[in-house]
């Protein structure tokens, strides 16, 4: 069977090449530009007939990239691909998982429907599963979630002296517990109340006995920076040192770095699931074995072994 073909959305070429290298595949360039009116132009000058195609897309700022993503999947299929999978190390639109107010768009469901229509399978890292138990609740294609906890635990153990892992809110408990268990570290979870996109109030739990530890805030997402900033302030008020921060997905919204700096947070370490300077923990080694299994296990909707 021929080698899988990895195609990157613009800007993610290095990631696609790393997947190709580590899995014995080929990276093929997608030509992408915009017409003067803003519409997208795409071209794939590569033989894709009966090939297993993987589109690699970092979707930290999804909206300008969604048309290219869907067009690229359709194009690969038009050019004869046997299957088209998506590796999106950060899966966007997972947080609008309920109508908080009447009439709001349930964008998690709409986005899942689009992806499930255009792709045969999906691999991602720690999606924001809060009110959903699994991606299968909204995605109708096979998907695999790869946890970042082992890699984050390794980074913390190698770089931070005497850490205590702390989650800023109840939702973060799943990541905090996994990281702490992996690295055999103590952990605590704080309580958060959110009053708006940028307005959170965080209360520290009992931290007695941990004064000599380095607090490490672990969360899945940093967006406005309000959660980490609020948690850092509460930790310092409780008598701990200014925390280190380790986050899976560094979205870093506008002014977030200023908000973090004002709260005494010098550095946030993230995976490279989003294309930001803070993304230093690599996702390719974490994802490669799962991506290979998904390529091998999943054929196109309606395709058969013969057209491989
Ligand atoms: C929320 O439930 C998430 O786990 C994160 O805590 C949140 O998305 C972080 O957002 P922000 O940086 O805007 O506070």
Image (cartoon, rainbow, N blue to C red):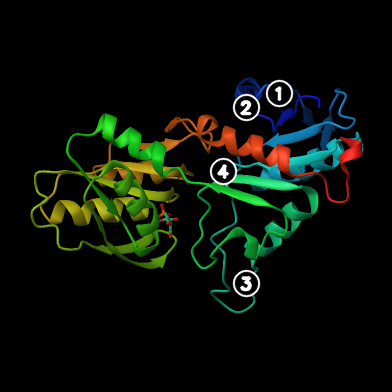
Q: Position of residue 127 (x, y in %)?
A: 53, 52
Q: Residues within 10 Å of mark 4 (few under 14, many from 20)?
A: many
Is 263 situated above or below 291? below
Task: Say which element carries label 3.
Answer: loop
Q: CA distance from mark 2 to mark 4?
A: 19 Å
Foreground mark, 4 or 1, reads: 1
Sequence-first tag of 4 and 1:
1
Kindly identify which residue carries mark 3: 104
Sequence-first tag of 2 and 4:
2
Would residue 285 be found to the left or right of residue 141 on screen?
A: left
Q: Position of residue 83 (x, y in %)?
A: 81, 40
Question: Which of these two is toward me, 95 or 237?
Answer: 95
Kindly identify which residue carries mark 1: 25
Kindly identify which residue carries mark 4: 60
* Residue at 59 percent of width and 51 percent of height: 92
CB under 8 Å between discs 2 and 1 = yes
Quadrant (top left, top right, bottom left, bottom right) of the N terminus? top right
Q: CA distance from mark 3 to mark 1?
A: 42 Å
- Residue 35 visible in this rendered orientation of the protein: no
Q: CA distance from mark 3 to mark 2?
A: 38 Å
* Residue at 72 percent of width and 54 percent of height: 141
Kindly identify which residue carries mark 2: 19
């Amino acid at each position: 069977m021929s080698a899988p073909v990895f195609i990157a959305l613009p800007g993610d070429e290095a990631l696609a090449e790393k997947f190709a290298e580590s899995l014995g595949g080929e990276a093929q360039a997608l030509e992408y530009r915009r017409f003067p009116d803003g519409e997208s132009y795409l071209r794939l000058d590569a033989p894709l007939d009966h090939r297993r195609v993987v589109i690699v897309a970092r979707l930290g700022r999804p909206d300008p990239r969604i048309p290219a993503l869907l067009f690229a999947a359709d194009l690969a299929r038009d050019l004869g691909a046997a299957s088209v999978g998506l590796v999106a190390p950060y899966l966007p639109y997972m947080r609008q998982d309920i109508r908080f107010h009447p009439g709001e768009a349930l964008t998690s469901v709409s986005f899942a429907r689009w992806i499930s229509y255009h792709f045969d399978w999906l691999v991602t890292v720690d999606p924001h599963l809060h009110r959903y138990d699994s991606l299968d609740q909204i995605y109708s294609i096979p998907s695999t979630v790869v946890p970042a906890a082992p890699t984050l635990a390794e980074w913390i153990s190698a770089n931070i002296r005497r850490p205590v892992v702390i989650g800023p809110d109840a939702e973060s408990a799943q990541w905090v517990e996994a990281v702490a268990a992996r690295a055999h570290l103590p952990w605590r979870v704080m309580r958060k109340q959110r009053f708006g996109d940028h307005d959170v109030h965080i209360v520290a739990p009992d931290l007695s006995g941990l004064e000599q530890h380095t607090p490490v805030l672990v969360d899945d997402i940093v967006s406005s920076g309000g959660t980490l900033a609020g948690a850092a302030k509460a930790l310092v008020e409780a008598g701990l040192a200014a925390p280190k921060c380790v986050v899976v997905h560094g979205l870093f919204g506008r002014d977030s770095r200023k908000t973090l700096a004002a709260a005494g947070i010098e550095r946030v370490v993230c995976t490279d699931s989003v294309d930001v300077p803070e993304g230093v923990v690599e996702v390719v080694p974490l994802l490669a074995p799962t991506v290979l299994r998904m390529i091998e296990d999943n054929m196109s909707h309606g395709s058969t072994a013969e057209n491989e």
